[in-house]
Amino acid sequence: MRYHLTPVRMAIINKSTNKKGTLLHCWWECKLVQPLWRTVWRCLRKLYIELLYDPTIPLLGIYPDKTFLKKDTCTHMFIAALFTIAKTWKQPKCPLTDNWIRKMWYIYPMEYDSAIKKDDIMPFAATWMELETLILSEVSQKEKDKYQMISLISGI
Ligand SMILES: [Zn+2]
């Protein structure tokens, strides 16, 4: 449980703790965050994305294959997961899949705006259509209605 305090606090509590090791624990190794990462990977497979189950990919953005095309999709999913993990850091519980999905859903309109500005709307639209299907397959009906409402409001 105390591992879910911030690394700085951890360092104060336990001076002998290796800071790097603690960070990796908080973001990846901990048994409380592993279920979320496993869900992320399960979703990637549903999108036909085969990636090594390796923390350097989501945490450092280092992809083993430089020509990897679905990088943007993965990056969005990873950022949402990292936000979700950071939010539950001080609580002795697992970061929830629902929270992760919600986070992805909120990134959507922001990314849409920046895609329009960069005149990059086509690849963006394709990616998000895939993600939208995935998100809706992961959430409950109650949540679904809510997401579709948000879609309507943001005019996507
Ligand atoms: Zn832990």
Image (tube, rainbow, N blue to C red):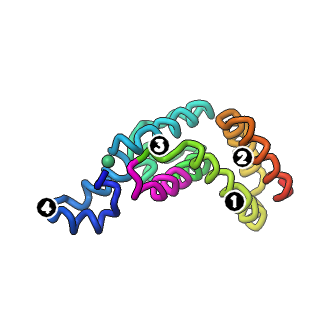
Residue type at numbered disc 4: Ser
- The first of marks 1 and 2 along the sequence is 1
Residue type at numbered disc 1: Glu
* Quadrant of the rendered image containing residue 120: bottom right
Q: Residues within 10 Å of mark 3 (few under 14, many from 20)?
A: few
Q: CA distance from mark 3 to mark 1?
A: 24 Å
- The first of marks 3 and 1 along the sequence is 3
Q: Which residue is mark 4?
A: 16
- The first of marks 4 and 1 along the sequence is 4
Q: Residue furthest left?
A: 16
Magenta stretch: helix, strand or loop mostly: helix
Q: CA distance from mark 3 to mark 4?
A: 37 Å
Give x and y (percent) for residue 53: 41, 37
Q: Which residue is mark 2?
A: 128
Residue type at numbered disc 2: Trp
Q: Which residue is mark 3?
A: 65
Q: Which residues are magenta?
A: 79-92
Q: Which residue is mark 1?
A: 111
- The first of marks 4 and 2 along the sequence is 4
Q: Nearer the viewer, mark 2 or mark 3?
A: 2
